[in-house]
Amino acid sequence: MYKTMQFDGDAPIYRQLADAIYADIAGGDLSLGDRLPTVRELAETMGLARGTIKRAYEELERMGAVEMTQGRGTFVCYRPAAPQGRKAAAMEAIDEMFRKLGELSFTPAEISIYLDLKMRQFAGREKTMRLTLLDRDPETLWQVAEQLQTLRGVEIRALRLSELTDVSAEWEAGVDLIVTPAQHAQAVARLLPDPEKLERVALTPKPETILALTRLAPGKKIGVLCRTARFAQAAAAVCRTYARADVVGTFLFGMGDLAAFLSGCDVLLLPPDHERLCSEEEATLLAAATRRHPTIRFASAVDEGSMLHLEQRVQSLLQNGLKA
């Protein structure tokens, strides 16, 4: 099932997989009550991380297409709510809207901002605040965004700093709070008309990452694989602090001979959900390599003190009518 599926670089792999399964469900290839493969089965079949499959299933459950039951499995629960013609009409209307906005020279980033604003007005969520997370590195950005999803009453939007080519008053008007790691705070503050909306947080490696590093035997050769040089430098520094093993090099996805790099490593250090960051060919090589070599996920999180302060500020904003 989906063993030969091809992924592109325009969307996260879990999202592409969820869309493919949803299309089969909506199209009738999978029927009400059908059982999907387990996370482990599909991960092994496709050569993907279990976390990627789990996120795809969770997305399908959010869409109302499947039901996940502990101990039983994942089952199709989709029931068509309207004729296919209604969906086609909606797609045409959206395409027409994008066409008109394109004629007005709006960029995709600007369109996203205005859509967020209008959706918020449409939903009428008076007690929901908009939080934007900014970071330079996608490896850290997605991890922290997932952690911030635990905040109640908050809609999270994650952006890389490189995407903020034009920070306008309209953009800031749609945001109640802006969160960024402390090391980027000065750069972000210079971009904002209202720096008071900025909340700095400190990031730290997760305990399970540190524990895995301390357990490595001396002399083992660690290879760091990621997308950005900044993340590689941070990961290598943590390795030098906690591991008795040696970092023999770093590999940036899309830049070099991955097979040759892997041949010189005993242990692989990867960001969580690395499939989002690498090409299909690199993902295939890594799927095989992670079965041969010990693999450590370099996971980071907002530290306890920063998270507590952020939660308090969010609740204060909600209680005071979102006036930053």
Image (spheres, rainbow, N blue to C red):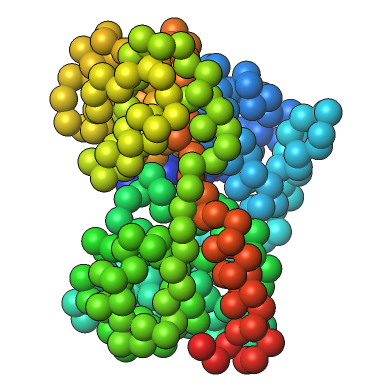
Above or below 95: residue 301: above
Res. 279 image quadrant? top left
Residue 137 seen: yes
The residue lying toward the viewer, choosing from 86 and 99, is 99
From the viewer's perspective, is 173 left or right of 24? left
Residue 101 seen: no
Res. 57 image quadrant? top right
Where residue 126 appears, x then y in whole percent? 64, 86
Q: Residue at x 81, y 37 (%)?
A: 69
Res. 319 image quadrant? bottom right
Above or below 110: residue 201: above
Where residue 177 appears, x then y in whole percent? 48, 77
Farthest residue in the left direction? 256
Q: Residue at x 39, y 79 (%)?
A: 114
> How many numbered marks appear?
0
Where residue 159 appears, x then y in whole percent? 37, 62
Q: Residue at x 63, y 21 (%)?
A: 40
- Quarter the N terminus occupies: top right
From the viewer's perspective, is 44 left or right of 241? right
The residue lying toward the viewer, choosing from 45 and 71, is 71
Q: Residue at x 21, y 12 (%)?
A: 260
Above or below 105: residue 5: above
Farthest residue in the right direction? 71
Where residue 256 appears, x then y in whole percent? 16, 25
